[in-house]
Amino acid sequence: MAGGSIFLFETTLFSTYISDVFLFIGCPHYSTTRLISTPPTLISIVPIATGYELRLRAGNPELLFDGYKLYVGNTENDSRFPADLNSGIECMNGILNILPNQPLEYSIELSQTEGPLAAIGTGENTNRICKMQVSVTSGQYLTLRSQVLVVSITNGTATGFVFSMPSNSLRVP
């Protein structure tokens, strides 16, 4: 038993020593600079039975990627640079149908109605990310920004979102 006790003592002492070493040489190299998320690239906007299909290329591999915000304006600058970034339109209920982490062409359904995604019709993009409840009219400009959740380093709680630079803008046909 004495040998077992010594082994246990040595193991505990070694574990404590290793913990102290890692604590001492732990990673002090972290950044307080916010992550810069990649904006999507808008390809086209086409009419569909329920409203419009906004087609985009995106690849958002960020761990805390939370989705997109759509900004609508009467001018390109109004849609690209809103007074408040929180004023954009999000995916309905914050639900993403697909996580856009591959460099593929995706789409977002823009519809005035609530409810689930519409059935995908012939010629429509099958990689539909989500549905945004919004009313858009011909001549308006659309811009997307990706948003990433920001987590506090000190206490691990969410502190808000960081938004990407604006995507290119498209004019509603």
Image: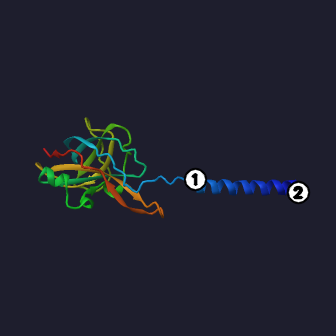
Question: Which image quadrant is residue 157 in?
Answer: bottom left
Q: Residue at x 15, y 55 (%)?
A: 78
Q: Quadrant of the C terminus?
A: top left
- Say which of 126 and 20 sits in front: 20
Image position of 53 with respect to 27: above or below: above
Instruction: Say whether residue 14 is visible.
Output: yes
Residue at the disc numbered 2: 2
Q: Quadrant of the N terminus?
A: bottom right
Q: Residue at x 21, y 54 (%)?
A: 71
**What secondary structure is found at the residue carrying circle 1?**
loop
Residue 145 at x, y percent in the picture:
27, 50
Number of numbered discs visible in the structure rendering: 2
Residue 142 at x, y percent in the picture:
19, 49
- Say which of 169 and 89 sits in front: 169
- Say which of 21 and 138 sits in front: 21
**What secondary structure is found at the residue carrying circle 2?**
helix
Residue 150 at x, y percent in the picture:
39, 58
Q: Amino acid at mark 2?
A: Ala
Q: Residue at x 38, y 42 (%)?
A: 101
Q: Amino acid at mark 1?
A: Ile
> Residue extending furthest top?
123
Q: Nearer the viewer, mark 2 or mark 1?
A: 1
Q: CA distance from mark 2 to mark 1?
A: 34 Å
Mark 1 Cα-neighbour bin, 10 Å: few <14, some 14–19, many ≥20: few
Instruction: Say whether residue 1 is visible.
Output: no
Q: Are marks 2 and 1 in contact (CB under 8 Å)?
A: no
Q: Earlier in the sequence, mark 2 or mark 1?
A: 2
In the image: residue 99, left or right of residue 41: right
Residue at the disc numbered 1: 25
Mark 2 Cα-neighbour bin, 10 Å: few <14, some 14–19, many ≥20: few
In the image: residue 43, left or right of residue 149: left
